[in-house]
Image (cartoon, rainbow, N blue to C red):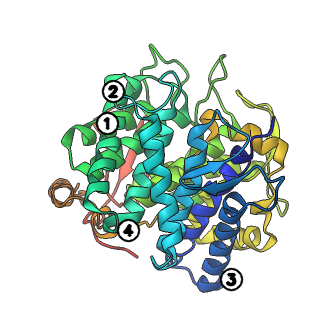
Amino acid sequence: MESPVSRLVLLVCLAAGFALALALPAAGSTTRMLSASARAAQARLIASEALSSLADKAGPSDSQWYADGVWHSKDKACWFCATGPATLAATLWRVNGRTDPRLFKKAVATFDRTIAAKRNSNGSFGEQSLPNTQFFGVELGTTYLLLGNRLGPKHRVAWRKSISGAADYLIRHGDLTWATNGNINLGNTELEWLAWAITGKQRFRNAYELSWRYTIHPSQTRWRGYGLHITREATGTKGAGLGAGYLAESGGKRPGFDPEYTMLQLSVASRAYLLSHDPRFRWLANMLWNQLSPLVKRPAWTLDARNGTRRSNLDMLTTPGMAVLATAGGRNDLLPSLDSQISTRHVHDVPAERAAELGQREHLPAATATSSASPCSRWPALPRRACDSRRRSAVRCPAATRAVSPRSSHLPACASRGTPSTPTGVIATRSTCSWTDAS
């Protein structure tokens, strides 16, 4: 059965990613089909139309609308689906100059109401046997950063408590060392980063690094076949030369490549990169895009997702990953493709019967992409101790090239030109690792 909120949740992810990623200047770009301002304006239009379709009641027969903190729809089960539009509202509020109080109120009312209704005493949200806590926690944490200090002190305290409670629940519950599926482990990693950035607590930084390790290379004794699979070795340090790969997904059988869920992984990785500016997310997003790109039919912008380990479909390309890489990620080679996708407006054309299925449970990239600048300079709501801690612990890349194993405490955490190239080794080269606003 078609779920109206689920039907557009992928568009929410895509539109929000477009709105913020395309509002940034393309890194080092020279020629483009569209000017930066035209690209940004088109992205905001796409995002605004997506939000209006969710919020405005078109008539008596329309079952989908917003009122008093609730995004109404026929779908009563996927409650966390209804928080994605609130994150999109926060995104539009921010990129449009923080001037529309209606967007701000929609975001705040939605999360206040959901926290009151769904938070459990142990910090989790909703049904604890499902990944609800991670999906909702990422939405809440992202919106907290987007709204910044415009949230009052009481709201910041209450939302921080909910975010840290969700992250602590994942730690206590053992989710960070349990290979659920690639998209889930990657989302867990993002939530732990959000908790660390927002609270400044060292335990969340430790959990963030632990989750990264298990996402890329879980124990093959217990989790054989899970983790990162390299399908094309790197031949360079940029763009298409970074190689290709995917995080394994399983529908109950042997884990492997699922194009549809790899598209979700790309959405999570690209959003997390823009939130955190951690180059590991950019590296992974490049790998995932390079894996998917041969399966994308242009100019229809469809994805051949047949014969996956979990699903087998022909889908529309519903990820902001290409937009993020083309702009904030410095992939100038992707700008013509991005402008083509925007101009044809295929970002809207998710078939209803497919989008309803895609929007269920694990295939909900809660999400919003944000600026690629430093967390401390970009997000004014971060506590000073988090920013101070970040500066003290910033990795200084050595002048000489070095190899680091994914089994070690962390992959290179600096903005280097070098990037991970194989499952057994990564390359970090001389670079600047200071946290400065790059926008």
- Of the 4 image quadrants, the one containing the N terminus is top right
Specify which label sits upstream in the sequence, 2 or 1.
Answer: 2
Left or right of residue 351, residue 423 in this image? left
Disc ID at residue 272: none
Q: Residues within 10 Å of mark 2 (few under 14, many from 20)?
A: few
Q: Is residue 244 visible?
A: no
Figure check: 260 above or below 348: above
Q: Tell me which numbered mark, 4 or 1, is placed earlier along the sequence.
A: 1
Q: CA distance from mark 4 to mark 3?
A: 23 Å
Q: For mark 4, give the secondary structure.
A: loop
Q: Quadrant of residue 286?
A: bottom right
Q: Residue furthest front?
A: 60
Relative image position of residue 329 (x, y in whole percent): 51, 65
Distance of mark 4 from mark 2, alpha carbons?
34 Å
Identity of the residue drawn at 54% across and 51% down: 285
Residue 174 position in % (x across, y down): 36, 22
